[in-house]
Each structure stands twice: as C-alpha cells, then as structure tokens.
Image: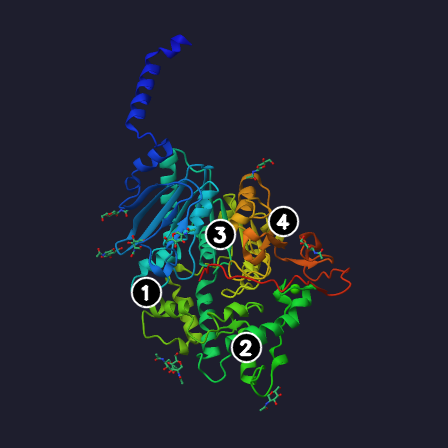
Amino acid sequence: MLKMALSPRYLIATLVAVCLHLIKPATADDFQANCLSLKPEQYISNSTRTVLEYVPAGTNLTFPDNVASCSRPSQVVSSDICRLALSIPTSNRSSITFEAWLPRDWTGRFLGTGNGGIDGCIRYEDLAYGSSQGFATVGSNNGHNGTTAIAMLNNLDVTIDYAWRSLHTMVTSGKTLTKKFYRQSPTKSYYIGCSLGGRQGIKAAEMFPHDFDGIVAGSPALDFNHLISWRASFFPITGSANSSDFITPSQWDTLIHDEILKQCDGLDGVLDGIIEDPTICDFRPEAIMCSNATNCLTPTQVEMVRRIFSPFYGEDGQLIYPAMQPGSEVYAIQKLYAGAPFPYSDEWFKYVVYSNPNWNASNFNLRDAAAAEALNPGDIRTWPSSLATFQSTGGKIISFHGQQDNQITSFNTPRFYDRLLRGMQKTTSELDEFFRFFRISGMFHCNSGPGAWVIGQGGDASAEGIPFAPQNNVLAALVAWVENGTAPDTITGTKFINDDPTEGIYFQRSHCRYPLRNTYLGGNSSRPENWACLPMGTIAQDISSLRSDSTSMRPFKIQRSYT
Ligand SMILES: *[C@@H]1O[C@H](CO)[C@@H](O)[C@H](O)[C@H]1NC(C)=O
Ligand SMILES: *[C@@H]1O[C@H](CO)[C@@H](O)[C@H](O)[C@H]1NC(C)=O
Ligand SMILES: *[C@@H]1O[C@H](CO)[C@@H](O)[C@H](O)[C@H]1NC(C)=O
Ligand SMILES: *[C@@H]1O[C@H](CO)[C@@H](O)[C@H](O)[C@H]1NC(C)=O
Ligand SMILES: *[C@@H]1O[C@H](CO)[C@@H](O)[C@H](O)[C@H]1NC(C)=O
Ligand SMILES: *[C@@H]1O[C@H](CO)[C@@H](O)[C@H](O)[C@H]1NC(C)=O
Ligand SMILES: *[C@@H]1O[C@H](CO)[C@@H](O)[C@H](O)[C@H]1NC(C)=O
Ligand SMILES: *[C@@H]1O[C@H](CO)[C@@H](O)[C@H](O)[C@H]1NC(C)=O
Ligand SMILES: *[C@@H]1O[C@H](CO)[C@@H](O)[C@H](O)[C@H]1NC(C)=O
Ligand SMILES: [Ca+2]
C-alpha cells in the first residue's frame, strides 16, 4: 500500500488534483466546470455558439431573444443541466437554432424533440421534461423562427429544413456533442413529438432509420400535402364569419356538440361526454334542422355540417383526407371553422406552393390540392407504405391520436396503420412487433379534453403528475420496449381534477391499441379494469343498461396548443 501511495504516478496525480482544486472556485463542481469549458462550436462545422451555461435545478430560464409568437418567454428547469445553443448552417441561405440540455444525472440516453404547426419554435417544456428524466435532450427551431411560414417564401432550403433536415441535423449534432460532453456515446436514442412533431418522427423513421431506436409519434401530421388541403377546405365550406349562414361558435358549442353527444356518447355504454370510438358515430345533422334559425340549423347549415363530417375527395375521386371525427367541434371552432382562412394552410399555399402572397384562400379548390401534392415541397409528404429498414435496425414506434382531435382528424392514423399493414404485408400482430398505435379517447389535439389524456406526451401535459412508468407514460413505455423488449399492451391515461395534478386524479382509463376497441364491461366506468380491449364488432354482453356517470361531463382546461 505504502509503496503504491508513494509511486511517482500517484504523487503526480495528487499534485495535479491539488492544483486543479486550488484553481477552481470553491463552489464549482466538475459537472459545472466541464460544462463551462466545453467548446461546442469546435465540433460542429461552421456553427456559432449563442449560449453556454450551467443551469441549476429550479431556475426559471428566460428567453429574451425568442420571438413572441412562439409564446415561450420562460421555462422552469427542474434538474441541473448544461445548456448550450448553436446556430448551425444547413445551406448558404438557411440555418437552424439548436439547443442541447445535458443533465447532470444522465442515464446514457439521448432524446430528440419535435416542433408543432408551421413553426419555428423550440419546445423548451419538452427539453425540460426530457432532461429531468435523465435524457441528453435536444431541440431545434426547425429552420425558422416563429409561427409563420414567411421565411419559406422563395427559399426552398428553409422548407427542406422544416420538412426533415433540421431534425436530422439536430440529431447528428446532438449525438456528437453528447459524446464530447460525457465522453461516452449515448446508449439509446429516442424521439418524442406530436402533431407536426409526430410527422417529423415518422419522417425520421422513413428517411434516417438509424437516427432513433425509439419514436413517440403523437397525432401525426401525415400525408402532409393532403392534410394542408383538407384544412384549407373548411373556409370555403363555412364562408366568412359575417356571411348569412355562418354557423356561430355558440351553435357549434351548444346545439351541434350537444346533438353529437346525444347521438353518440352512449354508443360506448357510458354517458360521460367521451365518444370512446368515434368511428361508429354516424352523426345525422338533419336531426337539428328547422326552417328558421333559432336554436336549430338551416338546411344550408346542415349541408355545411354534413360536408365537414364527410371524407374529402379529389378531382380524380381518390380520397384526399378522411372525415373530421365528431366530438372535436367545441375546440375546432377556434381555427378550422372560425370563418377565416386556416392560417397554416393559407401560408403554405401563399409562401410555399405558389410563392404568391396574394393567393386567395376563399377560392381554394381541388386543383390547389392536386398542385400541392404534385409539388410535395421539400419532400414533406410523409406517407410511407413501409418502414422495413427502421424495423430491421430494431427500432420501435409508439403512435397515439386523440379521438376528439380538433386539428388533425384521428381517422387518418388508422388509415396509416392499415397502409403499413398492406405495404409491409403483415398481420396486426406482426406490425405490432415494432409499431403500436393507441387511440386516446376524449383527447383533443395532442393534449386536453374530457378524457384520460395525460400520458406523458410532453412537458406541457402535466407529465410531472404521473409516474415515469411504462404503464402510465408513453416515453417510459418506449424505453421499456426498446431496452427490455416489453411492449405496451395498453397505455393508462390520467385525467386530473380540473386538469391540475395538484388537485388529484379524477379518473383513469387504459387506452387500447388499434384495431382493438375499448369496450365497457359494466360497473364503475371511472375504473380502468371495467373496460376491455376487444376486437371491433364485439358487443360486451353484460351491460344491463346505459350508465350515466354522475361525476361526468368531465370539464376540461385547454393546455398549450401545438398549433
Ligand atoms: C462550412 O463553410 C464553408 C465555407 O463557407 C463551406 O465551404 C463548407 O462546405 C461548410 N461546411 C459544412 C459542413 O457546411
Ligand atoms: C418565470 O419568469 C417569467 C418572466 O420573468 C414569469 O413570467 C413567470 O411567471 C416565471 N415562472 C415561474 C414559475 O415563476
Ligand atoms: C432565431 O432566433 C434565435 C434566438 O432565439 C436567433 O439566435 C436566431 O438568429 C434566429 N434565427 C433566424 C433565422 O432569424
Ligand atoms: C448557394 O449554393 C448553391 C448550391 O447549393 C449555389 O448554386 C449558389 O450559387 C450559392 N449561392 C451563393 C450566394 O453562394
Ligand atoms: C366580411 O368579412 C370579411 C373579412 O373579415 C371582409 O373582407 C368583408 O368586407 C366582410 N363583409 C361584410 C359584408 O361585412
Ligand atoms: C322558428 O322555429 C321555432 C322552433 O322550431 C318555432 O317555434 C318558431 O315559431 C319559428 N319561427 C318562425 C318565424 O318561423
Ligand atoms: C377573395 O375571393 C373572394 C371570393 O371570390 C372575394 O370575395 C374576396 O374579396 C377576395 N379577397 C381578396 C383579398 O381579394
Ligand atoms: C427492465 O427489466 C428489468 C428487470 O425486469 C427492470 O429491473 C428494469 O427496470 C427494466 N428497465 C426498463 C427500462 O424498463
Ligand atoms: C368510481 O371510481 C372512482 C375512481 O376509482 C372513484 O373515485 C369513485 O368514487 C367511484 N364511484 C363510485 C360510485 O363508486
Ligand atoms: Ca361515452
């Protein structure tokens, strides 16, 4: 022992340690020092550093340079992190803003986060969520800032960033920096995103199958060119908000939504304001038609409602996009049925498809839909019929979709699942070996709604109120699947009282994977065990009567929008 302690190597090491200790301020620790001495711009070609800071847990970070339309002026950080931001060029006329939040308590895992709508906005809440669970977490602005597409006007490179390149650049840069910082490559690489972010996840699996081992793709904006057209189709149907037959928000809210619940809420055996499976809700707006417009619909309005809830077909008779599912109207009035051009579709046609800021959304028609699909800007379509390469790398995907989605009809994701079945020539149990799709009843677009919608889908979704456990949290379920081979059969969602985790749990429901249907068995409908995942067409035999859940008509609070 003595000999070893006095060896020259030991003495030198001790001397160095003592010197380092003397140079370092007494409050600093190795993690903080390593963070502040990192030179991230050295490892990413042509990048420029904009932020490098150590952020202790509990800090309320502010982002004074973040554009106002991103609505993210600050973020509370719940774990010690090393935060760095870079500007990384993607061409001679485009660049991305990249952020990495590298936690002190690193699990060895890497997490990429996605974007929403037509933005342009780093989801800081997802960076906080991922890093608090020990992931080295990265995000990007997807190639432009803010919630407008104007930067894409006459600049295909910005569109390409938005379609796929920003995410891929973010992942390759993020993995490089993670390795430099921790001196170890990440063990596994994950992705979480919803809406546009769901599309980004599927695009990554299609185009860069080695970027991720596991992908959470929520409410995915798939078949994107057609989605844009479907959303553009509502304004010509509704007319502007001052036109004579315009259906007002209060008509949608009280008259139409109430009638939809009257016709469809009970189909699942429980009157709780949740349409468990909207595919069997064949809504008849004619039931509320009358000849004058006091608390009923005119024949013209009935026709508008019928069109809104019908599939959207192209000039060639082919389906462009499936119908809007009933149950989403209370919130869909804010954008799709607002009597104004849907902003993202309007901008997409103006700035990307036609490069003509004077394009008039009132005149949108099927030729515009065909033009958008034919142009497929930046190869954004995202409608693969096979993800075989991703599967062959061992990759796993969990997709989910709220069954009262007010922005992207949830009927499109079963269409995608069925497309993969046909394209990959698989049975459902074979596809489920790497791709599982959960239908989340009572959830609006990515979050919110009357149902048990909290499933760990992002940092803004009360994720801190539920355990980071595979049964309750989609990201934890994905990790268990990738690393342990334990695939989720159901995901148990949580509804908090007033959507506030501090007030306690209101009820929970276990959501089934498509094509199984959540079926009420009788008893207390607030308990997950009184529901079962059964094949479509199965009728539960022991429901003696329709149950009216008195604690129901579950109120909801709108969460931060994915736009
Ligand atoms: C870095 O910038 C130089 C000069 O502008 C350019 O030639 C080179 O291709 C860039 N490298 C990368 C990886 O973008
Ligand atoms: C964080 O700071 C911002 C801006 O100063 C403030 O508006 C916000 O309320 C703060 N958040 C918390 C949780 O304290
Ligand atoms: C986007 O905003 C960031 C600050 O959040 C800024 O550093 C960057 O230059 C902006 N990018 C563009 C293209 O304007
Ligand atoms: C930018 O790069 C493209 C090729 O990607 C080239 O055609 C163009 O001339 C370059 N523009 C400038 C200003 O360097
Ligand atoms: C209706 O609203 C549109 C846009 O808000 C406006 O351009 C138009 O003048 C209005 N028409 C009438 C008749 O008020
Ligand atoms: C309008 O419809 C209501 C309910 O159907 C009816 O009571 C009322 O008499 C009608 N008014 C007119 C002017 O037709
Ligand atoms: C767009 O077209 C509609 C219908 O043709 C017309 O009423 C409206 O004035 C046009 N709007 C603009 C800004 O040109
Ligand atoms: C994997 O399974 C082992 C043994 O059952 C368990 O201890 C571990 O927590 C699991 N890990 C994950 C990520 O689920
Ligand atoms: C039904 O179950 C929920 C959740 O466990 C519970 O809070 C509620 O009291 C039960 N209702 C009845 C009538 O037992
Ligand atoms: Ca119901």
Instruction: Verify CB contact (< 8 Å) between mark 4 and mark 1.
Output: no
Residue for badge 1: 150
Could you tell me residue 507's position as x and y percent? 63, 55
| Whole-number angstrom distance, CA of label 4 to CA of label 1 | 43 Å
Q: Label 3's element?
A: loop
**Mark identifier at residue 251:** 2
**In the depicted structure, whether residue 351 falls above or below residue 46:** below
* Of pointers 2 and 4, the one earlier in the residue sequence: 2
Q: Nearer the viewer, mark 1 or mark 3?
A: 3
Q: Nearer the viewer, mark 3 or mark 4?
A: 3
| Whole-number angstrom distance, CA of label 3 to CA of label 2 | 33 Å
* Of pointers 3 and 2, the one earlier in the residue sequence: 2
**In the depicted structure, whether residue 85 falls above or below residue 506:** above
One can see residue 272 in this view: yes
Could you tell me residue 449's position as x and y percent? 56, 61
Instruction: Verify CB contact (< 8 Å) between mark 2 and mark 4.
Output: no
Residue for badge 4: 489
| Whole-number angstrom distance, CA of label 1 to CA of label 2 | 34 Å
* Of pointers 3 and 4, the one earlier in the residue sequence: 3
> At 29% from the left edge and 23% from the top edge, which residue is drawn?
19
208 or 76: nearer the eye?
Answer: 76
* Of pointers 4 and 1, the one earlier in the residue sequence: 1
239 or 415: nearer the eye?
Answer: 239
* Of pointers 1 and 3, the one earlier in the residue sequence: 1
| Whole-number angstrom distance, CA of label 2 to CA of label 4 | 40 Å
Residue for badge 3: 458
**Mark identifier at residue 55:** none
Q: Nearer the viewer, mark 1 or mark 2?
A: 2
